[in-house]
Amino acid sequence: MSDTNDLNGRLDRLSPEHRLLLERRLAQTGRPAPAEPGNSGSPQARRATAKSPAPSLIPLGDGPASGQLPDLSLLFFSGDAAAEEPDGTNPYRLLIESARLADRRGFQAVWLPERHFQRFGGLYPSPSVLAAGIATVTERIGLRSGSVVAPLHDPVRIAEEWAVVDNLSGGRVGLSFATGWHPVDFALVPEAFADRREIMHRTIETVRALWRGERIPRTDGSGGAVEVSTLPRPVQPELPIWVTASSTPATWLRAADLGAGVLCGLISQGPASLAQGISAYRKRWAEHGHPGTGHVSLMLHTFVGDDEDAIRERVREPLTQYLGTFLGQYGSVEEIRRRNPGLDVREDDAAAIVNHAFQRHFDGSSLLGGRDKCLRMLADAAAAGIDEVACLIDFGVGVDETLASLSLLADWRDRHSS
């Protein structure tokens, strides 16, 4: 265990971003998440010896969860758009069927991402189109972008498309906006990449104005000055807005300035960074005098069952592959060394690092496992200032298994709240 402890110590000295970079490079070896040296290979032995202390939102208590739980929603971001579905079905079957289930079981919303030309997330190039489809098979659940990559679009088109969805759904639309970060996405609008942050902020204000029915100046095809307003008129007089944030403090503050919610995750930031972001957001929100306290939605990978050891082994392979594809969007181990002079990072740590990534995510950054763990995680999330947990479910487990997991999670929540 001394070698493993040494590895964990060196990993802990990495920033979250750089740890992801390293894990990505080594995950490309294609190795499954292994047991650590000396394990017998049984689930119980792996759980006892391979698991290093994993940070949670706040330390998970030993007793039953208590207190109010956050709202539950669904979030999608498939890891490999080029791969066949586990059960050979239509790649959008899980999206449609889980939205129907969530609609019946009192989930708050379905979050739909935007990604172009990439295996990771590539099933979702157009969240408005998918939201329109879901609108026709559901009755009450919110339909939200998670996220619209604002610099890739004319704000007039954003307002038009989502006003259509608002009408189809009877007023259930909400939008989270993102700057985008992957250069390949910007093959659509390469000139927008450098100024993407400011473009996003301008886009939010323009979409809000159009949603309210205001007119904005444009130039028509003949070069003339015109003022345009969008049709159809949406059902909701004000558009619910979120900003997608990672560990960048300025993003949290700007969301509060705008009176917007925040959509965030733990996969690219640690619990300490998340807590700092929430605290800064609430403080800035109050300084502006906005009503309420804002809204924070946290993405967590989700798959639950009665036997936690069985769940760990069921998700080990698909989640390891998913994390490897996610991490594959980042740079190389050479970049980590360049940015961290003197840091002892070795290529031969590959097997243990892949295991470390899986264990860290399973134990402290997800709703993966049994009832007690997952309800405590939800209670911890509420105590940490999370208003809503967006359950990411499309990471490689079969459709029917995932639907059963969602039903069980809804049952646990209902019994806890009764």
Image: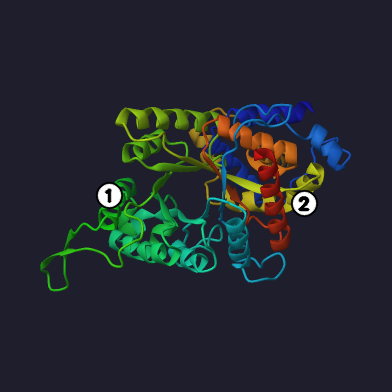
Tell me if I can see residue 348 in this picture.
Answer: no
Q: CA distance from mark 2 to mark 1?
A: 45 Å
Residue carrying label 1: 205
Please, what secondary structure does the residue beneath circle 2 have?
Answer: helix
Q: Which mark is residue 39?
A: none
Is 103 positioned to the left or the right of 185 in the image? Answer: right
* Res. 300 in view: yes
The residue sitting at the left extreme is: 224
Q: Residue at x 81, y 47 (%)?
A: 310
State the residue in front, 293 or 6. Answer: 293
Q: How many marks?
A: 2
For mark 2, what is the residue? 314
Identify the amino acid type marked 2: Arg
Going by the picture, which residue comes out furthest to the front? 418
Residue 68's place in the image compared with 143, above or below, is above
Residue 373 appears in which quarter of the rendering?
Answer: top right
